Amino acid sequence: MEEGKLKIKASTLMKITSTSKDIICLFSLTISFIYLMLRITMIVLTKKFDFVIFSRTLESNLWDLAWSTDIIMGIICFFAITLYFKNKVLSISIFLVTLFSISIWLFMMLGSKTIIPISDPSLNGNYAIHQYLYPTYKDTLTLKVTVYKESYPLLYKAINTTTESVSSRDDKETITLFNKAAYQISNDGKTLSYGKMSISLE
C-alpha cells in the first residue's frame, strides 16, 4: 500500500516537473520570437530608413547593444528548443547562428558608434551627436561631428555632419573640449560649439 502511494507521489512529481519545464521552455521561445521580430524591425529601420536607435535614458546606442543581446537570446533559444522540441536539426541551426553572433561580436564592437545626448533648455527637441577624431598629418587633427535629431521615440535621424581640420599646436583648446565632449549651445539653440569649431543643429 505504502509502495503504491510512493509511486503515485513520484509520478505526480514527475508530471509537475515536466509541466514546469514545458512552461519555462514555451515562455523562453515566446520571448525569443518577440525578440526576433524586434531585431528584424531594427534592421529595417537602420538599413532602409537610416535611423539610429538611441535611448537617452540608458545613454546607449541600442543597435550596438543588440549584438550582445543576440548572443544571450541565442543561448536561451537553443536550450529551449533542445529541451522542448528535442529536434537536433533545429537545435544545431540555432547553435550555429549563435556561434556566428559570437564570432562577429568583437568586430561589431570595434565598429560601434558612441552616441552622446545633448541637453540644454534652449534646444527645440531632442538631439544627440556622434563625434570622431583622427590625425590627418603632422600636427593637424580632423574633427568630425554628426548631429542627430529625434524623429520618433528612440529613433534619431542624421541632420548634419561637420568636419574640420584643427592644428593641435595652434588650437589646443578646441581639441581638449572636443575630447571631453564639453560642448556649448548657443542662446538660440541653433549651434553647438567646441571652442572655435561650430556645428549647426539645423
Image: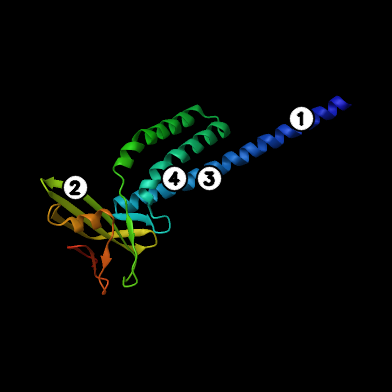
Callout 2: SS: strand
Residue 36 - label? 4
Residue 156 locus on image (x, y percent): 32, 59
Q: CA distance from mark 4 to mark 3?
A: 10 Å
Q: Amino acid at mark 1?
A: Ala
Residue 2 locus on image (x, y percent): 87, 27
Position above or below: 80 against 166:
above
- The residue wearing badge 1 is 10
Q: Quadrant of residue 1?
A: top right
Residue 20 locus on image (x, y percent): 65, 39
Q: Amino acid at mark 4?
A: Leu
- The residue wearing badge 3 is 30
Residue 129 locus on image (x, y percent): 28, 58
Residue at (43, 58) in percent of width and height: 57
Say few, some or many: other residues with alpha carbon within 10 Å of mark 4 (under 14 / 14 to 19 / 20 or more).
Answer: some
Decide: marks 3, 1 in contact (CB < 8 A)? no
Decide: marks 4, 3 in contact (CB < 8 A)? no
Q: How is the image coloured?
A: rainbow
Q: Amino acid at mark 3?
A: Thr
Residue at (22, 56) in percent of width and height: 145
Residue 134 - label? 2
Decide: marks 4, 1 in contact (CB < 8 A)? no
Callout 4: SS: helix
Name the quarter where the C terminus is drawn.
bottom left
Of callouts 4 and 1, which one flags the residue occurring earlier in the amino acid sequence?
1
